[in-house]
Amino acid sequence: LIEQVAGRAGRAELDGRVMVQTYEADDVAIRAAATYNRGMFLRAELPKRKLLGYPPYVRLFPVRAARKHEPLPQQGCHLPEQRLEGDAAVFEIGLLG
């Protein structure tokens, strides 16, 4: 995201400058974005994502529960989750959250 924002700075005739405030200035994501080195970022990030089961190694989709007029009761939120857990073994699905 930092690289994407930085790429928007300085378009047209105006010079641009990006300033990032962070507690982790030596983090590989910050260093890679500062030098526009996507390869450095991917070499560090992709093994973590694979280990944790995050994209691009899996596909994620959001599940949202809402009611029109009343807050959804807590137990009502768990019904879709229980159904998905039952299907998860059949379709090799994992649940996050």
Image (tube, helix red, strand yellow):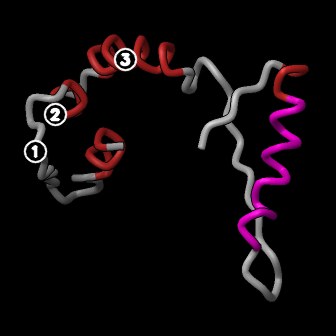
Residue 72 percent coordinates (x, y) = 76, 74
Residue 52 percent coordinates (x, y) = 49, 21
Q: Nearer the viewer, residue 36 or 50?
A: 50
Q: Quadrant of the C terminus?
A: top right
Contact (Cβ within 8 Å) of mark 3 with mark 2: no
Residue 31 percent coordinates (x, y) = 15, 28
**Number of marks in picture:** 3
Contact (Cβ within 8 Å) of mark 3 with mark 1: no
- Please report the residue visible at 62 percent of the width from the left and 37 percent of the height from the top: 96
Q: For mark 1, what is the residue?
A: 23
Which element carries disc 3, helix, strand or loop?
Answer: helix
The numbered disc on residue 67 is: none
Q: For mark 2, what is the residue?
A: 34
The numbered disc on residue 42 is: 3
On screen, 54 above or below 46?
below
Assess disc 2: are there few (<14), some (14-19) or many (≥20) residues with their C-alpha within 10 Å of its C-alpha: some
- CA separation in Å, label 3 and label 2: 14 Å
- Please report the residue visible at 89 percent of the width from the left and 30 percent of the height from the top: 87
Chain-order first, disc 3 or disc 1: 1
Q: Label 1 sits on what residue type? A: Tyr
Q: Is residue 61 left or right of residue 48?
A: right
Q: Label 2 sits on what residue type? A: Ala
On screen, 62 above or below 89?
below
Dividing the picture into quarters, in which one does residue 74 lie? bottom right
Taking the view exactly as shown, the residue that stands out farthest to the front is: 75
